[in-house]
Image (cartoon, rainbow, N blue to C red):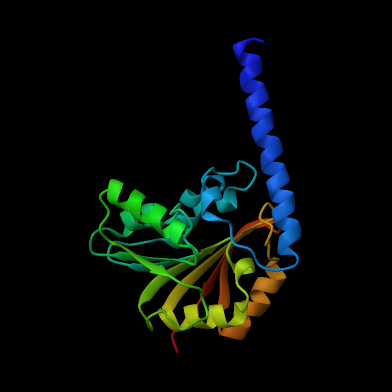
Amino acid sequence: MCEMDTVLWILTGLLVLFIIVSLVWRWQSEKRAIPCPSWLSWMLEPENPFSPANHARNIIAWLQLQPGMSVLDAGCGPGRLTLPVAEKVGKNGRVLALDLQEGMLQRTQSRAQAAGLNNVILMQGNLGEGNLPLQQFDRAVLVTVLGEIPDQVSALLEIYAALKPDGILSITETIFDPHFQTREKVVKLANLAGFWEVAFFGKPLAYTMQLAKPNA
C-alpha cells in the first residue's frame, strides 16, 4: 500500500470515528444535556468550512471588540475564542473563561500562558448558579453551549445581569452540534430574559445571533 493510500485510510477512519461519536452524542443528548468531554476538546478546534457563522474570526469580528473591554466566554471549552478575544481586548481588558469542566479550563490556562496572555480569568461552574459579578461585561459569548444548559432561562438571566447596560450577548448555533437550538427558540428564551435581537449572521441551520441588554 502506498503512502497516499495509507493517509486516505487514516483520514477515512478519523471521519468515520467523528461521525459515530457525533451520532451517539446527539442520541444521548436527546435524553439529557451532555457537554463535550475535555478529552474530545480537539474536536472543537477545527473551523467547519460549511459553517462560517461558527468561525472564531467571524464571531469575534462581529463583536466589534475594543481595547479595555471585559468579555465573558461562557462554556469556553479549550479556549478557541478565549485566546483571540484576550488578544483583541489587550492588557487593559479581561476575559472571564467559564466552563463546567476542569479539564477544559486547564487546557485554556495552558494555552493562555503559552501565548503570554495575562488577562484571562478562569471560573469553574455552570450558568444560572448566580456566580457571575453584576454589570461587569461589555460582551458575552455562548458558542454552541446554550443547549447544554439545564435551566436556559436562568442562565440567560444571569448573563443579562452580568452585562453592562448596552452590553451584547452573542449566541452561535450550528446544526452540526448535537444540542442545536433553533433561532425561534433562542429568540423566545432571550426575550424572557429581557434581551432583544440586534443582529443575525448566517443561515437558519448555522448562525450567530447578537442580543442586546437595553440601557434602561
**Residue 11 image offset from top left, x and y in percent:** 64, 28
Q: Is residue 18 above or below residue 214?
A: above
**Residue 24 image offset from top left, x and y in percent:** 73, 52
Q: Is residue 210 left or right of residue 189?
A: left
Say whether residue 213 is visible.
Answer: no
Q: Is residue 154 left or right of residue 176?
A: left
**Residue 38 image offset from top left, x and y in percent:** 51, 54
In the rendered view of the protein, which quadrant contains the C terminus? bottom left
Q: Residue furthest top?
A: 2
As rendered, which of 4 and 57 lies closer to the eye? 4
**Residue 53 image offset from top left, x and y in percent:** 58, 53
- Residue at left 71%, top 66%? 182
- Residue at left 61%, top 77%? 152
Q: Is residue 8 above or below residue 180?
A: above
As rendered, which of 19 and 133 lies closer to the eye? 19
- Residue at left 45%, top 69%? 140
- Residue at left 25%, top 58%? 118
Say whether residue 144 is visible.
Answer: yes
